[in-house]
Image (spheres, grey):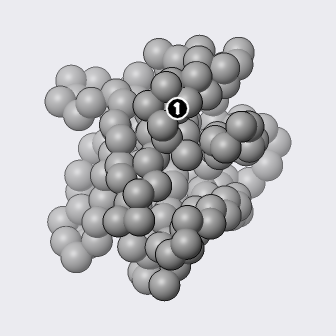
Amino acid sequence: MTLRIIVFSDTHGNYSAMHKIFKRNGDADLFIFLGDGERDLDSLRVQYLDKKIVNVSGNCDFASLTPENDIYMTDNGIKIFFTHGHKWGVKYSTDRLFYKAKEIGAQIALFGHTHCRYYAYEEGVHILNPGSAGAPRDGKPASYAYIDITKDGGIFCSHVDL
């Protein structure tokens, strides 16, 4: 069986975009939100009590008690490091994020903050930014991403236009 993870970020008050992601991906096993829209996510959690949702806070999630970085471990041992990214210099480089993932043995590193889609695979680490679901800055449509993890540990990442 394949584990389907939906990754989204930077909704900035666009509740309908966030809701659309959940409606489109009702069969997903996990939703990871990378910050800047935490209040809307809190509202959405009430509608989707049966969904597994994890998140970190972003630089615009004021007075949040949610951590800025977190780690999720899948049942088959894939480690995912996820952060909003504003404390990791991601607007300039993903190097610090990559080295943190290597240091902790993560196979996937997720970040938001830039509002731009990004994907790279370096030395066994998938580095992914889903883009912004609410306010993209890369000239592309609003987006999110999915990660499929196969039972034997295969990892496939892709962006999706919202």
Q: In which quarter of the image is residue 83?
A: top left
- Residue depicted at 55% across the width and 46% down the height: 107
Residue 10 in view (yes/no)? no
- What is the secondary structure assignment of the residue under circle 1? helix
Q: Quadrant of the C terminus?
A: bottom right
- Residue depicted at 50% across the width and 75% down the height: 151
Question: Is 48 positioned to the left or the right of 85 in the image?
Answer: left
Placement of 118 over or under 15, stated as above or below: above
> Residue 32 at what x, y percent from top left?
41, 53
> Residue 9 at what x, y percent from top left?
50, 45
- Residue depicted at 48% across the width and 84% down the height: 1
Query: Which amino acid does the dot numbered 1 rest on?
Result: Ala
Between residues 85 and 63, which one lies in front from this camera angle? Answer: 85
> Residue 25 at what x, y percent from top left?
49, 76
Residue 55 in view (yes/no)? yes
Q: In which quarter of the image is residue 75?
A: bottom left
Question: Is 64 positioned to the left or the right of 142 in the image?
Answer: left
Between residues 55 and 121, which one lies in front from this camera angle? Answer: 121
Q: Which residue lies furthest to the right in this view?
A: 139
Placement of 38 over or under 57, stated as above or below: below
Figure label count: 1
Badge 1: residue crowd in 10 Å (few <14, some 14–19, many ≥20) = many
Q: Name the residue under label 1.
A: 101
- Residue depicted at 55% across the width and 72% down the height: 152
Placement of 54 over or under 59, stated as above or below: below
